[in-house]
Amino acid sequence: MTDDRYVDRVAVVTGGSRGIGRQTVERLARDGYRVVVNYAGSKSGAEDAVAAVAAEGGTAIAVRADVADEVAVAAVFDRAEESFGGVDVVVHAAGRMALGPLVDFDLAALDDLHRTNIRGTFVVDQQAARRVRPGGAIINFSTSVVGTSFPEYSAYAASKGAVEAITMIVARELRGRDVTVNAVAPGPTATELFLDGKDEQTVARLAAAVPLERLGTPADIAEVVAFLAGPAGHWVNGQNIRINGGLV
């Protein structure tokens, strides 16, 4: 059921074609947001997300862009404004993961990772800072590994540490705008990105490390994102929230 508090609100969700981004698209649409589903490579996934929203009576459109390309990202925001009249919430869920020991980590992979995760966050937040309307929210994605310091995550965690720094600074730079800026930091979550390359024993070990003794789900994360995006979460600002079932 659409909540009247969300009437005419518009959300841009990067990485909205799969995983947590896809779940966030559907969750925000259920609240009544009109949603711009940004995707980089999975056109079919983005179209499926749009169709899922429409099936529930909501409104969404899919727009392709590499989040590290400032011209393409500006065009996503242009499309949101042209189609829906403005932007109230930006959820930057797009990201890349590459794992391996620092000692022999491929530097080309490092550059690709940081282009998406650091430059991409900077570019998306730059447009969001210019365009999000008063009362709105910007929500970035970090990772709990910044705190847990698991081996083989040095490149990925370093990129997400940068995301946290950007988030805290932009929250203060937007003083007086009535726009909140926060980051969420999921722990082990059952997404394609997380599960890729992990055997059953590794997945079981990570699930067992969580006091709630399971992996998170995309829906677990999307609920917190929806809270931060909406009026109930508007007093939360300049924070990094670890959503990990109690994983230290």
Image (cartoon, rainbow, N blue to C red):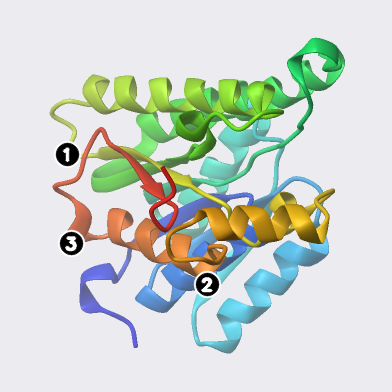
Nearer-the-camera pick, 176 or 102: 102
Disc 3 is placed on an element classified as: helix
Q: Which of the 4 image quadrants contains residue 96?
A: top right
Query: In 3D space, how far apart are the residues under numbered discs 1 and 3 (Cα atoms)?
Result: 14 Å
In this figure, which residue is indicated by the disc labeled 2? 26
Foreground tag (2 vs 1): 2
Check the image and report above or below for 139 versus 223.
Answer: above
User: Mark 2 and mark 3 in contact (Cβ < 8 Å)?
Assistant: no
Q: Residues within 10 Å of mark 3 (few under 14, many from 20)?
A: few
Could you say which quadrant of the image residue 150 lies in? top right
How far apart are labels 3 and 2 at the CA level? 19 Å
The type of residue carrying mark 3 is: Ala
Image position, residue 135 (x, y; %): 20, 48
Query: Which image quarter holds the C terminus?
Result: top left
Which corner quadrant of the image does residue 84 belong to? bottom left
Is residue 51 among the parts visible in the rendering? Answer: yes
- 43 relative to 71, above or below: below
Say which amino acid is labelled 2: Glu
Residue depth check, mark 1 versus mark 3: number of the one nearer the observer: 3
Q: Position of residue 195 (x, y in %)?
A: 75, 55
Contact check, label 1 and label 3, Cβ < 8 Å = no
Tell me the residue that label 3 is attached to. Answer: 232
Label 1, on which residue? 178
For the residues bearing labels 2 and 1, Cβ distance under 8 angstroms: no
- Please report the residue visible at 66 percent of the width from the left and 28 percent of the height from the top: 151
Q: Would residue 25 be seen by someone viewing this image from the given angle? A: no
